[in-house]
């Protein structure tokens, strides 16, 4: 099987769907002439032309609004934010227009739109460019929120997101665009709302998603050396959440640690903990632990970044706390 980069997997997903459906178009800052800020859309302007791969001004509210209007009138836009930190400028269109239209129209109008781009930290970018907003968007009914952890999943999930008749927020990571892995050449789709067990285990469950899955997997490998068998569940979609897979894993392992790159208050980890303790309380041998980003704006200094973000050492500590309490 061929090996390609994460960015190439995303490009293939968009291009394959655009070849099939002329109503699909890509719009955002630098997506056309510059081949994308992260080269995700490299070559797409040459193939599809300027009417379907559209450069925009630095005006997120404006081009997000154009996308919502186009989606409400029969087109299927892909709106790229250079970073989801900039989506805050457009959040009124995402939340109050795209997410609400189907309900407010009594089911008369679907808004088949994908908002995609990188989320969370990406090195020394400081507080205003390092925020994880997955839980913010997942809080809003009417949206689906996807956070892939690898290129294989990203391609299959993005193809499903583009075909979905509801608005989808598709969140990537700048630090993953160069990641390489095997991705089939033949067409495939991964349904939204279905988690994946990336590593089977028997002693404790770790639930995570997005690039922090790397931290979860690294911790699981280290813990295996100490005789602790860790099952790692990749949510892939944080709205809707596949509670069934999570709870069944906890029923097997009796312990749970949730890891995510977001601030702790009202996070996905808190939601998972609540749901598991509500529906699988009798199976738990220890309280649920969460490992999140420190409850502070992300600093600039690399040493402080390392101290703020989830890492393997913090995950290992949390696992041992639920194992040996």
Image (cartoon, rainbow, N blue to C red):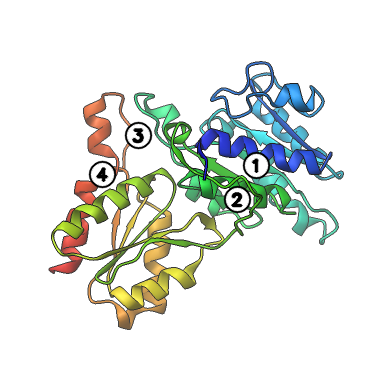
Q: CA distance from mark 1 to mark 3?
A: 34 Å
Is residue 42 rendered to the left or right of residue 244? Answer: right
Can you tell which of label 4 and label 2 is closer to the viewer? Answer: 2
State the separation of the CA atoms marked 1 and 2: 7 Å
214 relative position to 55: left or right: left
Comparing 164 with 302, the one in front is 164
The correct choice, above or below, for 190 with respect to 250 in the image is above
Q: Nearer the viewer, residue 214 or 263?
A: 214
Q: Tell me how many marks there are.
A: 4
Q: Earlier in the sequence, mark 1 or mark 3?
A: 1
Q: CA distance from mark 1 to mark 4?
A: 31 Å
Asked whether the viewer can see residue 49, the reply is yes
* Residue identified by numbered label 2: 156
Residues under numbered marks 1 and 2 in contact, where contact means CB atoms less than 8 Å apart: yes
- Which numbered dot is residue 297? 3
Residue 312, image x, y percentages:
24, 47
Kindly give the residue lying farthest to the bottom in the view shown: 282
Q: Residues within 10 Å of mark 3 (few under 14, many from 20)?
A: some
Residue 13: mark in rendering: 1
Element on which disc 1 rests: helix
Q: Name the residue rendered at 15%, 64% in the picture.
A: 227
Q: Indicate which disc residue 311 carries.
A: 4
Assess whether mark 4 and mark 3 are in contact (beta carbons under 8 angstroms): no
Q: Nearer the viewer, mark 1 or mark 4?
A: 1
Relative horizontal placement of residue 278, taking residue 37 as reference (left or right): left
Q: Earlier in the sequence, mark 3 or mark 4?
A: 3
Say which label, 2 or 3, has the lower sequence index: 2
Secondary structure at badge 3 equals loop
């Amino acid at each position: 099987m061929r090996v390609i980069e994460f960015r190439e997997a995303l490009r293939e997903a968009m291009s394959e769907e655009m070849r099939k459906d002329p109503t699909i178009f890509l719009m955002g800052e630098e997506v056309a002439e510059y081949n994308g800020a992260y080269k995700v859309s490299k070559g797409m302007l040459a193939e599809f032309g300027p009417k379907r791969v559209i450069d925009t001004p630095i005006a997120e509210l404006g081009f997000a609004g154009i996308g919502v209007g186009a989606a409400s009138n029969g087109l299927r836009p892909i709106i790229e934010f250079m970073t989801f930190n900039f989506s805050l400028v457009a959040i009124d269109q995402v939340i109050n227009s795209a997410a609400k239209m189907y309900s407010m129209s009594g089911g008369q109008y679907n808004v088949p739109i994908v908002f995609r781009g990188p989320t969370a930290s990406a090195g020394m970018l400081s507080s205003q460019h390092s925020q994880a907003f997955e839980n913010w968007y997942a809080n809003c009914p009417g949206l689906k929120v996807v956070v892939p952890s690898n290129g294989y999943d990203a391609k299959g999930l993005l193809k499903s997101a583009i075909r979905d008749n509801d608005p989808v927020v598709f969140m990537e990571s700048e630090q993953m665009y160069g990641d390489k892995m095997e991705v089939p050449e033949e067409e495939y789709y991964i349904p939204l709302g279905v988690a994946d067990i990336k590593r089977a285990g028997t002693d404790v469950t770790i639930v995570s998603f997005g690039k922090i899955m790397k931290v979860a997997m690294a911790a699981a490998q280290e813990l295996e050396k100490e005789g602790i068998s860790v099952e790692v569940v990749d949510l892939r979609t944080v709205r809707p959440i596949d509670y069934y897979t999570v709870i069944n894993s906890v029923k097997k392992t009796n312990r749970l640690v949730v890891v995510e790159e977001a601030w702790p208050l009202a996070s996905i980890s808190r939601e998972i903990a609540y749901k598991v303790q509500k529906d699988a309380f009798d199976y738990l041998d220890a309280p649920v632990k969460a490992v999140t980003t420190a409850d502070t704006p992300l600093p600039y200094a690399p040493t402080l970044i390392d101290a703020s973000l989830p890492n393997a050492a913090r995950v290992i500590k949390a696992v041992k706390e639920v194992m040996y309490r």
